[in-house]
Image (cartoon, helix red, strand yellow):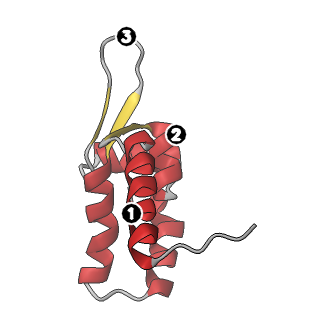
Amino acid sequence: MKYIIDEKDMTTLANKVADKVSATTISPRWMNVKQAARYSNIGEQRLKAMAKAKVIKGAKDETGNKAWFFDKESIDSYHESFFKAGVSDATIKKLLANADKFL
């Protein structure tokens, strides 16, 4: 059996699916070190070094568990800063590959 859906019904269905997906998707501003590493494609140790150097916002939880947390917006700003400066993709890759030497 085939169903024919007009554009109005398709739009309604698409909006309902989008609402359902956005309601179940969590996008935290603050991420633990594993989430931040996966999100940013930057290693855990390097993220910690960048936070200590105040390149990105991040801190160790001093309440006892010693977990690290990183600000998603500061990671985004860090990545965007390369594009604003007009740096080539090859240069970015080279910088990222050697960043531990500079931090």
Q: CA distance from mark 3 to mark 2?
A: 18 Å
Upstream in the sequence, badge 3 or badge 2?
2
Dot 2 falls on a residue whose secondary structure is: helix
Upstream in the sequence, badge 3 or badge 1?
1
Q: Amino acid at mark 1?
A: Thr
Q: CA distance from mark 3 to mark 1?
A: 49 Å
Read off the residue under disc 1: 12
Placement of 68 over or under 98, stated as above or below: above
Figure label count: 3
Read off the residue under disc 2: 34
Badge 2 crowding class, 10 Å Cα cut-off, few under 14, some 14 to 19, many 20 or more, is some
Read off the residue under disc 3: 64
Dot 3 falls on a residue whose secondary structure is: loop
Q: Amino acid at mark 2?
A: Lys
- Locate residue 15, reporting x and y percent: 38, 60
Dot 1 falls on a residue whose secondary structure is: helix
Task: Answer with left or right where residue 3 lies relative to residue 55.
Answer: right
- Locate residue 27, reporting x and y percent: 37, 45
